Image (cartoon, grey):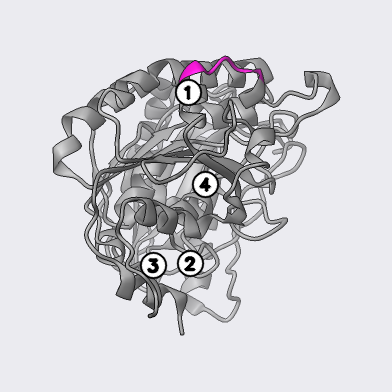
Amino acid sequence: MNVDSVYQELTGKPQGKIALVVMDGVGDIAIRENSYLTPLEAARTPNMDALAKDSAQGRMIPVAPGITPGSGPGHLGLFGYDPLEYEVGRGVIEALGLGIELKAGDVAARANFCTLDAKGIVTDRRAGRIPTETCEKLCAMLSKKIKKIGDVEVIIKPGKEHRFVVVLRGKGMEGPLTDADPQKVGFEIPAAMPKNPKSTKAKKTAKVIAEFYKQALPIIAKEKPANGFLMRGIAHQPDIPAFQERYNLKPACIAVYPMYKGLAQLVGMTKIEGPQTIAEQFEAYKKAYNDYDFFFIHFKYTDKYGEDGNYAAKVKAIEEFDAALPILLSKKPDVLVITGDHSTPAPMKGHSWHPQPVMIHSKFSGSDKLDRFTDTGANLGSLGVFPAKYLIRYMQANAGMLDKFGA
């Protein structure tokens, strides 16, 4: 019997509020240079420490052992969708997060401005993290000059800092395509190619993207430091079951960055717009407390500083998160989960395969008798190491939603 169908049969009404609070990329590794302390272990976190004493802890495998996930698979796993079954391009997620209403046949790509040398070699994949205002100016330049490629409409919308979205709208289009991104400096921008070489629709998409590069790069060639751009997650919108139907929970998303809003929207969560800091996000949660059963609250900066390789800044971000936590705890949910969508170790300057720590706090979670919420401590927790796609089921169980299985 399919395990999801078993859960479906056992699912009842929630007996309280559930909050999934995601410190993006919070997981890390202990190395000699950092005194064998991960950022979670080095940070001063009195509020999470207090929760840890009455919580269950463990670690989660976001996709499968050894697989390094992107943010899309990482979050889909947290939402209970097997990332290997539901593959979603980052472009679709980012486009939804920016408020673009995708139509059937639309292909979306997540893009970011980069720096190219005179030979077209990528020297900085994020163009020094240009300010959002610069991104908006560059996107306006491209939008003014490139409105259509053949019979395909081109929609360009800026995001935060160096990020933007390109949506291709026309007949006979589909993804997924490989990334027009070498993923590291020192290489040229590769051509985007169909992942299914037999797909004529994907071949057309690849030709449109190649022509887009041909027209767009000369427009920004004299801009510094953002004189190029990379495109990845090139795909069309897939069909995914709605979160509320799947789990019998009315969900809301409180995130700042478009990609995470898009992920939430993809599964049918209501986006609560406006908050820009974690303190404001927790305040928004309090205001919406009576309107929803499930809250997804996203904190970006642990991942950002991990990708920058900035250990000290990642520690500080964790401390800032912890300092704001009492706002949420003043209207404490019945089930509170604090975790990451994956690990982003500062020494690696990127996402990794290492299981991320997770803490579940509820009336029935029990205590693992741990004094802190840390990577190393989570190894000793009663939850053990488990696939992230089952986290939602632990949340449902702690909320009294799952009936007994069998006689």
Q: Position of residue 103 (x, y in %)?
A: 27, 62
| Residue 184 horizontal side relative to residue 137, left or right | right
Q: Quadrant of residue 105?
A: bottom left
Give residue 50's mark.
Answer: 1
Is there a contact, CB below 8 Å, between mark 2 and mark 1? no
Q: Quadrant of residue 369?
A: top right
Q: What amino acid is labelled 1 in the image? A: Ala
**Around disc 4, counting alpha carbons within 10 Å, would you say few (fewer than 14), some (14 to 19), or many (20 or more)?**
many
Marks 4/3: CA–CA distance: 17 Å
Q: Secondary structure at mark 1?
A: helix
Give residue 238's mark.
Answer: 3
Q: Nearer the viewer, mark 2 or mark 1?
A: 1
Q: Position of residue 248 (x, y in %)?
A: 24, 61
What's the residue at 50%, 65% (across, down)? 82
Q: Nearer the viewer, mark 2 or mark 3?
A: 3
Marks 3/1: CA–CA distance: 41 Å
Q: What amino acid is labelled 2 in the image? A: Gly
Q: Quadrant of the C terminus?
A: bottom left
Q: What amino acid is labelled 4 in the image? A: Ser
The image shows residue 265, relative to residue 169, as above or below, that is above
For label 4, the residue is 71
Residues in magenta, as a range: 42-47
Q: Nearer the viewer, mark 3 or mark 1?
A: 1
Marks 2/1: CA–CA distance: 47 Å
User: For this rendering, which residue is in front, 239 or 368?
Assistant: 368
